[in-house]
C-alpha cells in the first residue's frame, strides 16, 4: 500500500500504474495552478513522474486539448512526454517530473535571455496544429478586448486604474491599433507564456500547460508574456519588443476586458493574475500609443 497523506482512489491509482507500467510507491499532491485539475508527483522504484488529471468538465476539456497537442508536437522546449489517457472522464497526462527545477521569479538577464531563445526555437518548430481562429474561436482567448470594454466599460472602470474621461479619450486609438494586430500566423505559439508555465531544468528551459497552443502570430505570443515579466521585476515590455503598439493594444485589451469580471468558479485566481498583468500591460499601451498618463 502506498503511504501518503492525500489519497487518490484505487481506480485512479490503477489507471496511472497502467500508463507508466510500474507500481506507484509514493505520491504527493502538488498545490498550484489556476484550476482544480489534480496534480501529483508519483514515485516508482525507478523514476518519478508528474501526473495531471482532469477533475471537472472544464479541466477535463483543457487536458484533452493538452494531450492532443503533446501527440502532435515535440521539441526541447517541452517536457518529456511519458503517457496519456484522453478519456472523456478524468483524462490523465503523464510527463517528466520537474519538481526539482527552478520556477521563476526572480528573473535576471541570463534567465530572460534563455527564455527568449527558447521561445524563438518554439516559434520555429514544425507543428500540425490548427490556426488561432480555429483553435480558439469559442474559447476564453477569442474576442476583441477593447471592443468589449467599449460596449460595456463598467467592469474595466471598476478596477480604478483610469476614469471614464481617460477611457473616452483613449478608446479610439486602442481600438484602431487592436484591430491592426494580427492573430493569424504560421508559427507554433504557446499562448499562455507566464513564469508559472516555465521551468529551468538544468540546461533546459521548458514550457508547460500546452492546452492553448496553436499556429499564430509569434510576435503576439511573445508580447503576451511581457506584462507578467515586467510585473515580476523584469524589463518593460518595449525593451524586449520595441515599436509594437498593435501588440500592446491587443494584449492590454485582452486583460482589460477580463480582469474586472466575476470570479471564475473553476479558476478563482485567474482574475487576480489578469489584473496583475493589466497593471503593466495598460501602461505599456499608453506609452506605445502616446495616450494620456493613467489617472
Image: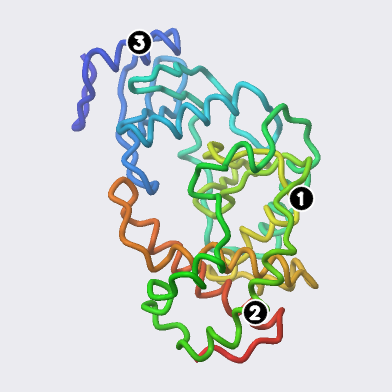
Q: Earlier in the sequence, mark 2 or mark 1?
A: 1
Q: CA distance from mark 2 to mark 1?
A: 35 Å
- Residue drawn at (72%, 68%), measured in percent from left and top? 246
**Which residue is denoted by mark 1 in the rendering?**
117
Q: Nearer the viewer, residue 152 or 78?
A: 152
**Which residue is denoted by mark 2 in the rendering?**
172
Eye-nearest disc, 2 or 1: 2
SS under mark 2: helix
Number of residues whose C-alpha sits closer than 10 Å to that of mark 2, classed few (under 14), some (14–19) or many (20 or more): few
Residue 205, image x, y percentages: 65, 44
Number of residues whose C-alpha sits closer than 10 Å to that of mark 3, classed few (under 14), some (14–19) or many (20 or more): some
Residue 273 location, quadrant:
bottom left
**Which residue is denoted by mark 3 in the rendering?**
23
Does 144 sit left or right of 97 as displayed? right
Residue 174 location, quadrant:
bottom right
Residue 229, image x, y percentages: 59, 64
Q: Earlier in the sequence, mark 3 or mark 2?
A: 3
Does 1 sit left or right of 207 as displayed? left
Eye-nearest disc, 1 or 3: 1
Q: From this view, report whether residue 46 is shown above or below residue 288.
A: above
Amino acid at each position: 500500500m502506498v503511504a501518503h497523506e492525500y489519497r487518490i482512489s484505487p481506480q485512479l491509482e490503477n489507471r496511472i500504474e497502467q500508463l507508466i507500467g510500474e507500481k506507484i510507491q509514493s505520491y504527493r499532491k502538488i498545490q498550484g495552478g489556476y484550476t482544480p485539475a489534480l496534480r501529483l508527483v508519483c514515485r516508482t522504484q525507478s523514476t518519478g513522474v508528474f501526473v495531471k488529471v482532469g477533475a471537472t468538465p472544464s479541466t477535463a476539456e483543457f487536458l484533452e486539448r493538452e494531450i492532443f497537442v503533446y501527440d502532435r508536437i515535440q521539441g526541447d522546449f517541452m517536457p518529456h512526454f511519458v503517457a496519456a489517457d484522453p478519456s472523456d472522464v478524468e483524462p490523465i497526462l503523464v510527463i517528466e517530473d520537474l519538481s526539482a527545477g527552478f520556477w521563476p521569479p526572480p528573473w535576471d538577464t541570463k534567465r530572460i535571455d534563455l527564455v527568449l531563445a527558447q521561445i524563438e526555437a518554439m516559434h520555429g518548430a514544425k507543428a500540425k496544429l490548427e490556426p488561432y481562429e480555429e483553435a480558439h474561436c469559442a474559447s476564453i482567448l477569442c474576442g476583441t478586448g477593447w471592443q468589449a470594454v467599449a460596449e460595456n466599460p463598467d467592469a474595466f472602470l471598476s478596477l480604478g486604474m483610469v476614469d471614464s474621461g481617460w477611457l473616452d479619450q483613449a478608446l479610439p486609438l486602442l481600438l484602431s491599433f487592436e484591430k491592426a494586430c494580427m492573430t493569424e500566423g504560421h508559427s507554433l505559439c504557446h499562448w499562455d507564456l507566464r513564469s508559472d508555465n516555465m521551468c529551468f531544468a538544468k540546461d533546459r528551459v521548458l514550457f508547460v500547460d500546452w492546452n492553448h497552443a496553436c499556429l499564430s502570430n509569434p510576435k503576439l505570443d511573445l508580447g503576451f508574456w511581457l506584462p507578467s515579466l515586467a510585473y515580476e521585476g523584469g524589463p518593460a515590455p518595449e525593451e524586449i519588443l520595441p515599436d509594437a503598439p498593435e501588440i500592446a493594444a491587443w494584449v492590454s485589451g485582452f486583460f482589460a476586458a477580463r480582469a474586472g469580471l466575476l470570479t471564475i468558479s473553476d479558476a478563482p485566481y485567474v482574475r487576480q493574475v489578469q489584473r496583475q498583468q493589466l497593471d503593466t500591460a495598460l501602461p505599456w499601451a499608453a506609452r506605445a500609443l502616446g495616450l494620456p498618463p493613467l489617472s
